[in-house]
Image: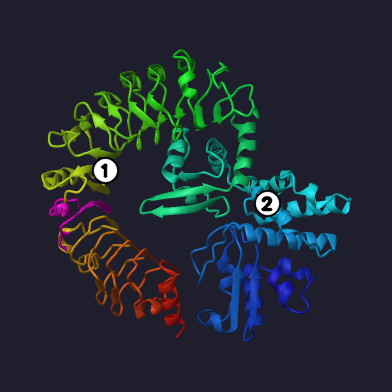
Amino acid sequence: MKLIQQMVEGYERDPSLEEMDNRSLQRMLGQHLQGSSCFIVLDNVSRGMELNYILNCLPSRGRLLNRLMLLLTSRYEFRTDVYYTYEMKALDSVKSWQLFLKTIDKFTSDGNKFSKDLERKGKEMLKKCWGVPIAIIDVAKQKSKQRLSGMAWEELFDSVDLSESLKSLEPMYQELEEELKPHFLHLSLFKENAIIREEKVKTIWAVNGLSSGSVVRVFADGSIFEVVKQHFTTKKIRLNPLLHMISIQKAEEEICLEILRSNGNNRLSQNARHRVIHCGRDKFDPFTNEDSKQLISLIFHGGGRYLDDASQSYWKTFGVLKILDIEDFGVKKTLPKTIGTLIELRYLGLRNNYIQEIPHSFANLENLEVFDIALNFMVEIPNIIWQMGNLRDLHMSDAIFRKPLKVDALQNLKTLEYISIYDWTYEDLIFGRMHTLQKLGIEEVDKMVDVGKLFALLAKFPNFYVLSVRGFHYRSMPCLEGIGVIKGLEVLKLDGHLCCLPSAHNLPKWIRYIALVNTCLDEDPLPILEKLGHLSKLKLQNAYTGREMVIQKGGFPRLEVLCINELWNLRNIQVDDDAMSIVRELEINNCPHLETLPEQIRRMSKLQKFKMVTTKHIATKITNSVEQ
């Protein structure tokens, strides 16, 4: 109706349109557009809008690019009937300042000129808008009014009030489906502007009884999350800081969030259920508030030796605590033994600290589902893990076990990574007790290991699909012949020196993602990998020592993403016709001798993203060859 009112003469205010059904409206619009050339913009398209109602009435859809063009703007991604998607990013410092200047000039009617010092001060102020245009415009309006009242720009740049911006953004929360609002509220537990592992977000949701599907799929809204880095089945995301403020406000109202800060800027709750503690350089005692009996979540951000000051009795006050997260906090040596009294604990996050030993008392954490002690170098683990019968995900790296881990005692285990091949008794594993394993990361694998026995065991797990293998220092890994018995394997990551790859028919048929890191292969791996009919993502990082790579005709029929990094000797990539025909992302980084690109890349019709990090000389040479 709106398109007809704007495009069909005489129908600007015709009430008869209200009485017409969709089919009649489509027919009228289609007849008017027949034979015409036009450019239609649909702004702020909602997720529930049925685009087909409009697309079906457009004439000659196969020749749209010649006569008619359609542009959609939306917070949501549309995958069907879209030729190209441009993903908006937050504005950088320069563009934020340009938008600010444009807005204040409009409201003050002045050609405002700023010294370099004032411009620097203004840009510093705008950092608090985090590149969000609506916030920058609101701040510019605010400052324009203050300027017109007689205040000097030197004073105006000292502070910024984002209250109006938060009000403008609040509808994004209100528009969420009711079942998704609790997911948004629990994002308040994370640190502002932090890069977060998607896996951790999903886990926190699951422990709180919420759906733990893909974060970006649950929030199909690119303005809430930014995917910072994507690797195979994992993503690292960043929550927009202004929306993080809204999540805190709403969480305080609806799930009893409490925030304690070392600078005294506390946000207390009378009946706190979730507590976030921010520790900085200021002297601070976060352990004085003993009203902790109802706490479900306790999250520490920052760092310091604060946990050293906590009494043993402090931890006994958390009778129903389910989530304890002390990730990246700088905890040293050992942890309080009384954490082992938190028998309702479901999630214990200790990643990236300096912990040397796990207390024996942790054996009492029988309800623990997620135990994350990764990135604690050479942490010693007593013979207690097997007693955590409900453990679902166990994340480690460079851990020292006093006795080999009895994996078959963990009947609910889905994820085990990374564990030394010598630290678990997989050869004597009783399969009937354990059949849930889906992801495994093993390290310290060398030629002395009989990987055939391991592969035969993994083939028995009906839902197993992710395998990561790390070598042992500078020793070579075995060739991995026999890995093909793991029929359901979809993701394979190899990190370490490898003498050769198995042949294509000895690799799992359904494998979709492969990463070869530091394998330093002497022979080009592509003639083998290009034959994998379901491979969609491939990463090669310091994977090959040769000078030339060849992709033959018809190779990689399903490949969508190719990343080539740190192939130090590579000088030429040859791509035959009809190879990599559906690749949409191509990335080449730090290949210092690769001075030309194959002509075939220009003819990749599906290619949407191409990134190359190289020297200025090579970049100029490649750019000139493309322009010719």
Q: Is residue 310 left or right of residue 554?
A: right
The dominant secondary structure in magenta is loop
Q: Position of residue 413 (x, y in %)?
A: 29, 35
Q: Is residue 573 left or right of residue 6?
A: left
Label 2 near label 1: C-beta < 8 Å?
Answer: no
Secondary structure under badge 2? Answer: helix
Location of residue 338 with respect to 66 vertically, above or below: above
Mark positioned earlier in the residue sequence (1 or 2): 2
User: What span is colored magenta in the figure?
Assistant: 477-503
Residue lying at 55% horizontally and 55% vertically, measured from the top left: 222
Q: Position of residue 601 (x, y in %)?
A: 37, 76
145 is within the stretch colored magenta = no
The residue tagged 2 is 126
Point out the residue furthest to the right here.
149
Between circles 1 and 2, the one closer to the viewer is: 2
* Res 602 seen here: yes
Name which residue type carries label 1: Leu
User: How many angstroms separate mark 1 from mark 2 (CA)?
Assistant: 45 Å
Q: Position of residue 458 (x, y in %)?
A: 19, 44
488 is within the stretch colored magenta = yes
Looking at the image, which is closer to me, 242 or 319? 242
Looking at the image, which is closer to me, 14 or 345? 345
